[in-house]
Image (tube, grey):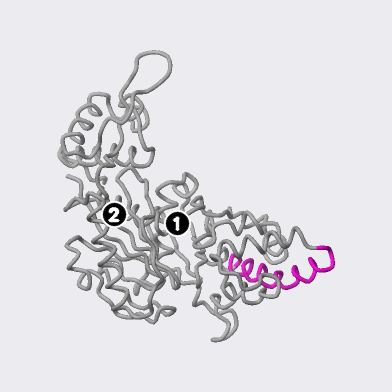
Amino acid sequence: MKKKLNPVSMKRENKRMVLRHLMEKGKDTRVQIAKDTGLASSAIWRLIGELEDEELVEVVDISKGKGRKSALYAPKSSFVSSVIYNVEVLEALVGVGFLNGSWKIVDKFETPKDFGQFKSLVIESFKSIRRNYTLRHGTTKVVFSLPGMVNYEKKFLINAPNLNWKNIDFQETFKELEFEVLAENDANLALLAEHFFCKDVKESKVAFFLYFGEGIGGAILVNGSIVRGKNSAAGEIGHVSFNGENCEVESSLSVVKLIDNLKPWLGNEEQQLAQKVEKIRDLLFSKEDSEKRVLEEVLQKYFRNIASAIRNITYLLNPDIIILGGLVNTIYEMFGSYIEKELDSILERDVFDTKIRDTVFKEVPPSLVGGNVLVLEDFLKSLE
């Protein structure tokens, strides 16, 4: 027997629906909101009015085109919804996010191995953000995207092996920031961002994100919810072994190790991981046939390893979609034909028709986008 919503609960759910619609779409008229949500026009007028009174939405434009002009409403962007520390092994990006789903990178610094130094850098950058942006108590939250196992409920980093950080209570550690702190695994945040913004992930029963950072991570989404597991280790594909303890997926798929193996072609130029991978693509298309064959032989093992990881994910979870991304967000766009060729030799494609694509977020780590989405989802749940 289905549980009936009382009028108060129904109103709260409807308000969440309207605000979520505007967060995901960016802006819309009351008439179109009513059509898209299925709510009555009178209810939309009332709910939009309440959201305006609560300073959560505002008129941002007037609709253009034939007929009567209508006001376009959007979530407020006059204050920051999230301050995001997207931590990777080599570098931490600092971003701010807004209720309309947008984000902006405002700072970056090298990630120190010493956690005390990291804490000091965070506090200094946060002071700068408070000077330059409006933060709102009760709404604005601080998010740490972390390359390791994280207990999201306890805001506790269990282990980030590549940083040698263990057993850190982020809420307690950063209590002097005076804002609520959230901590989550970077791959989980990346998949959360895809689910918030992308129709194909929304419509998937099962989705997987294969996260290419300095290490390798993974995230699982089932029926719209991130699967974290008993000890927050679900999706940690980097630590899965191909053949014995010394053959983990991370060592086989590491972009850093691939680049090290290709130093004779790439040289020692200081570049971001994504730029170096793009250079590999350019080399493949620019080299003479004889040298290209040698390069392809070096790369073939790497593409075979990606295909093997995808095969294992496919047989284990049978997902609707597998997304590739992280610090390198165009792997499938650049090398999809090579990966597909390897997959055809090891996977029954007529049985497993999983969709494979790159993340939609090209210019920024998708985990940073997911940091803001995490706050938006958290805020929607708390909406009265």
Taking the view exactly as shown, the residue that stands out farthest to the bottom is 245
How far apart are the alpha carbons under marks 1 and 2? 15 Å
Look at the picture and state if 330 lies above or below 62: below
Task: Kindly indicate the quadrant of the structure image that contains residue 334.
Answer: bottom right
Q: Position of residue 83 (x, y in %)?
A: 29, 57
Task: Kindly indicate the quadrant of the structure image that contains residue 94.
Answer: bottom left
- Which residue is under mark 2? 82
Tell me the number on the disc at residue 225: none
Which residue corresponds to the image point at 16% horizontal and 53% vertical from the top-left? 137
Q: Position of residue 228 (x, y in %)?
A: 37, 67
Taking the view exactly as shown, the residue that stands out farthest to the right is 290
Which residue corresponds to the image point at 26% horizontal and 53% vertical from the top-left? 378
Residue range corresponding to the magenta coloring: 288-311
Graded by Cα atoms within 10 Å as few (under 14), some (14 to 19) or many (20 or more), the crowding at tag 1 reads: many
Instruction: Locate the C terminus by quadrant.
Output: top left
Does the magenta portion include 301?
yes
**Three-letter amino acid code of the residue under disc 2:** Ser
Residue 205 left/right relative to 252: left
- Kindly state the secondary structure of the residue where label 1 is placed: helix
Asked if the residues shown at circle 1 and circle 2 are in contact, with their CB atoms under 8 angstroms apart, the answer is no
- Which residue is under mark 1? 366
Q: Position of residue 357 (x, y in %)?
A: 57, 53
